[in-house]
């Protein structure tokens, strides 16, 4: 199995090194294409107005000035030599990617771009963003077995797998749960106003450490309770109940005011 690795924390991130250890347990044919610098929150951004520079760091390792989406696109279509990869792994992100966060996550976007190009994609994230020395031990311990199980079972071609690992001691993690995407009932994103040394205001985007009260079966609840969360995601954002409801009032000749 040929595997392409990417991330949004950058080519030098500890999480990418952890992902290399994970991939090495699945294959000896592993390629890497990751951003030169951190691209957290980039979502599915595609670089269109600037050139993308590529550095070849060794035979199977590249960094680019682009986004995770750019990296997967270039890795699959241009940089990986010979046979196309069979699987794309994106991560391991420093911090969980749960609930509505998945729509802005560069980690999840890497897996989505793989799916869009016809290659199965898996996003991996590890809780513990605010730990000054975050451990990727849970991801390294459990990801290879979970990935192998998923690959052997297969999944729909329009779906990506989003795996989140709880923080803590490996021995304390005893369960995997297949979950649905949750949605927070607390607003945790905010802009903090600061002042630079010249007296000018600027803003730093961040997250409040405030937990929601998620429903059973959601990715949030699983992580809060120390379980590994595996969530099948797809990018069809259509809300079918609204489609059916609106068909009763819209359709046919456009209404005029």
Image (cartoon, rainbow, N blue to C red):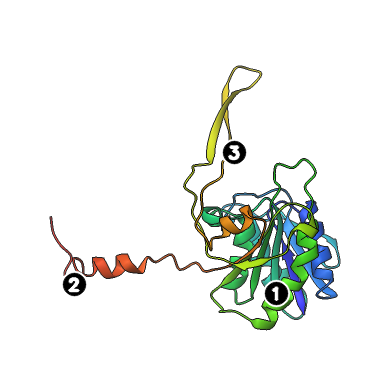
Under circle 2, the secondary element is loop
Marks 2 & 1, CB-CB < 8 Å contact: no
Q: Using the numbered discs, state the Cα–Cα distance from disc 2 to disc 1 in whole angstroms.
A: 44 Å
Q: Nearer the viewer, mark 1 or mark 3?
A: 3
Residue 252's label in the rendered image is 2
Residue at image x 81%, y 64%? 20
Q: Position of residue 148 (x, y in %)?
A: 74, 76
Q: Can you tell which quarter of the image residue 28 is in?
A: bottom right
* Neighbours of disc 1 within 10 Å: few (<14), some (14-19), many (20+): many
Label 1 or label 3, whichever comes before in sequence order: 1
Q: Which quadrant of the figure contains the C terminus?
A: bottom left
Under circle 3, the secondary element is strand
Q: Using the numbered discs, state the Cα–Cα distance from disc 1 to disc 3 in whole angstroms.
A: 32 Å
Q: Position of residue 144 (x, y in %)?
A: 77, 70
Marks 3 & 2, CB-CB < 8 Å contact: no
Q: Which residue is mark 1?
A: 87
Q: Nearer the viewer, residue 75 or 126?
A: 126
Under circle 1, the secondary element is strand
Q: Is residue 86 among the parts visible in the rendering?
A: no
Label 2 or label 1, whichever comes before in sequence order: 1
Q: Can you tell which quarter of the image residue 75 is in?
A: bottom right
**Compared to 174, does 192 lie above or below?**
above
Q: Nearer the viewer, residue 154 or 178?
A: 178
Residue 63's label in the rendered image is none
Residue 206's label in the rendered image is 3
**Compared to 207, does 147 lie above or below?**
below
Query: In the image, 116: left or right of 57?
Result: left
Query: In the image, 44: left or right of 151?
Result: left
Residue at image x 74%, y 69%? 4
Q: Position of residue 50 (x, y in %)?
A: 61, 52
Q: Nearer the viewer, mark 2 or mark 1?
A: 1
């Amino acid at each position: 199995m040929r595997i392409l690795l990417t991330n949004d924390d950058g080519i030098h991130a500890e999480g990418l090194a952890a992902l290399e250890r994970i991939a090495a347990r699945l294959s000896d044919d592993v390629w890497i294409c990751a951003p030169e610098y951190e691209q957290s929150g980039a979502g599915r951004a595609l670089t269109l107005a600037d050139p993308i520079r590529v550095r070849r760091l060794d035979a199977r390792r590249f960094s680019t000035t682009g986004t995770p989406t750019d990296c997967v696109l270039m890795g699959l279509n241009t940089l990986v030599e010979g046979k196309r990869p069979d699987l794309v792994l994106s991560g391991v992100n420093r911090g969980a990617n749960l609930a509505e966060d998945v729509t802005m996550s560069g980690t999840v976007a890497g897996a989505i771009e793989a799916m869009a190009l016809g290659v199965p994609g898996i996003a991996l994230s590890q809780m513990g963003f605010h730990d000054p020395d975050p451990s990727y031990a849970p991801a390294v311990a459990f990801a290879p077995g979970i990935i192998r199980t998923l690959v052997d079972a297969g999944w729909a071609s329009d779906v990506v797998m989003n795996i989140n690992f709880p923080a803590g001691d490996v021995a304390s993690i005893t369960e995997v749960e297949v979950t649905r995407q949750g949605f927070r009932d607390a607003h945790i994103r905010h802009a903090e106003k600061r002042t630079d040394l010249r007296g000018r205001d600027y803003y730093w985007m961040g997250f409040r450490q405030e937990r929601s009260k998620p429903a059973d079966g959601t990715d949030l609840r699983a992580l809060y309770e120390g379980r590994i969360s595996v969530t099948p995601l797809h990018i069809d954002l259509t809300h079918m109940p609204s489609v059916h409801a609106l068909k009763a009032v819209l359709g046919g000749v456009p209404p005029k005011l």
